[in-house]
Image (cartoon, helix red, strand yellow):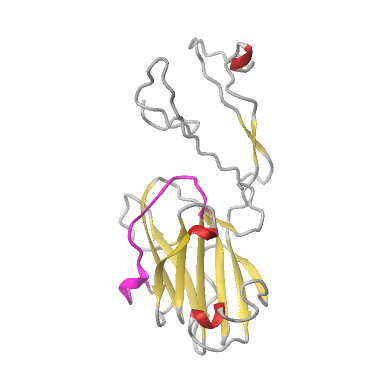
Amino acid sequence: TGSDDENGVVMPASIDPGSTVVLPVTVRNNTGANAWLHAWIDFNNDGVLNNATIANGGERLEAARVIAPVNTGGILREYWTGISGTSVANLTSHANYPNNPNGSDLRSNFTAPTDWADNMGQRMRGWVYPPVSGEYTFWVSGDDETQLFLSTDATAASAALIARVSGWTSPLEWTKSSEQKSVKITLEAGRPYYIEALMKEGTGGDNLAAAWELPGTSTGPVVIAGQYLAPWTANPPFN
């Protein structure tokens, strides 16, 4: 049909006999325990699935695949205290960065505490799971210098700077500078993309947040909710 059926399989508009067809399947397990992916083809269209594998005369494509759980619902925040300066470089050049933060916590959405401390730096990182496929726009706000990175895949190594605050903004102030807004970025529904924000605070007020606009909407910037985020871990279940 060329559409997404109730089981998350994107079917091509047509399948020719003897041809090879790829059927993309998007699976995200947020049950907190292992789940399993099963796949059959009802060759005779009788509504009854023969559980033997195709190699053994049945209709099952392969043995069930284990789908490890993904801990969605928030994003990791790490912080380094006692570092002066307002530039992100003051944080990233410090001896304790990146492996020895003074502490960390989990945030329920992509916002850090407001007016939390002076002379500190923060990193928020994890994975974002787009709910639909299409073109997304991202924004960042922060005080002082703030940078937002997004990867083309689940790895931090592929992350690139997409938006920034060179000076400072008020909390959730998205339009002070054009550089706070990314270009449109095409993302695939259900895939994990590594996302990271860096922020450096000198003195005075401080804040950090990231927002997006979903494809086909005109909402403007909306803070990325925890249901679309998973906190960074050294051993993600999808590796």
Q: Residue at x 33, y 57 (%)?
A: 184
The image quarter containing residue 172 is bottom left
- Disc tally is 0
**Vertical placement of 4 versus 93: above or below?**
above
Q: Going 40% across and 45% down the picture, which residue do you hit?
A: 133
Residue 101: image location, x then y, percent: 66, 75
Front in this rendered view, residue 122 or 30: 122
Q: Position of residue 36 (x, y in %)?
A: 64, 33
Name which quarter of the figure residue 107 lies in. bottom right
Q: Is residue 189 magenta?
A: yes
Q: Is residue 40 above or below residue 98?
A: above
Viewed as shown, does residue 120 lie left or right of 16? right
Residue span colored magenta? 174-193
User: Would you say residue 155 sits in the magenta stretch?
Assistant: no
- The quadrant of the image that shows the N terminus is top left
Residue at position x 65%, y 37% in the image: 35
Residue 95 picture location, percent across and down:
64, 80
